[in-house]
Image (cartoon, grey):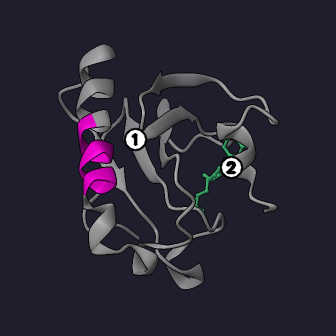
Amino acid sequence: MDCIFCKIINGEVRSNIVYEDDYVVAFNDLNPMAPTHILIVPKKHIATILDISDADADIIGKINLAAKKIAEKFKFEDFRLVANCGKDAGQSVFHIHYHFLAGRRFAWPPG
Ligand code: AMP
């Protein structure tokens, strides 16, 4: 499968991995939108949030736990976790991922 995140997960493409467990890997975004911009990605290939099934509930929980561990590791009490679903929402890589953004103030509502 020609998926850039699968290639990062299996080591075919290099990335700066900051966290990994049995379910997820997290690495620095190539094009950071904040001083800290980490992508939290499940090891299982799931194209979009609309493709998640009940059997994936553990994986989705592990993503949130990974965000907590990353926040603790880098000592952030304030951060944003964002997942884009579909092209119009800004999704460009069709392997689900959650953007962990920190190190500056963020506007709400988002643009
Ligand atoms: P999205 O637009 O929500 O699908 O987010 C995809 C993100 O993946 C973007 O922020 C890209 O900068 C990032 N990205 C794409 N390729 C790589 C890569 N090889 N290593 C790290 N981040 C990447």
Q: In this view, does 88 lie above or below 22?
A: below
Q: Quadrant of residue 68?
A: top left
What residue is rendered at 30% in x and 55% in y? 60
Q: Is residue 28 above or below residue 16?
A: below
Q: From the top left corner, tell me how far across and down residue 3 is, in percent.
A: 74, 58
What residue is rendered at 64% in x and 24% in y? 16
The residue range painted magenta reads 58-65
Q: Is residue 88 above or below residue 90?
A: below
Residue 106 seen in this snapshot: no
Which residue of the protein is positioned furthest toward the left in this rendering?
Answer: 77
- Of marks 2 and 1, which one's residue comes earlier in the chain? 2
Q: Quadrant of the C terminus?
A: bottom left
Viewer-side residue, 67 vs 2: 2
Q: Is mark 2 within 8 Å of ligand 1?
A: no
The amino acid pointed to by label 2 is Cys
What residue is rendered at 67% in x and 49% in y? 5
Looking at the image, how many numbered discs can be counted on the residues? 2
Left or right, 41 with respect to 21, comes to right
Left or right, 101 with respect to 25, comes to left
Q: Looking at the magenta stretch, what is its main secondary structure?
A: helix
Q: From the top left corner, tell me how far across and down residue 41 is, in percent.
A: 49, 47
- Label 2's element? helix
- Label 1's element? strand
Q: From the top left corner, tell me how far across and down residue 6 is, in percent.
A: 68, 49
Question: Of discs 2 and 1, which sits in the foreground?
Answer: 2
Q: From the top left corner, tell me how far across and down residue 105 is, in percent.
A: 30, 41
The amino acid pointed to by label 1 is Leu
Left or right, 99 with respect to 1, comes to left
What residue is rendered at 30% in x and 37% in y? 67
Identify residue for label 1. Answer: 101
Q: How far apart are marks 2 and 1 (CA)?
A: 22 Å
Res. 6 mark: 2
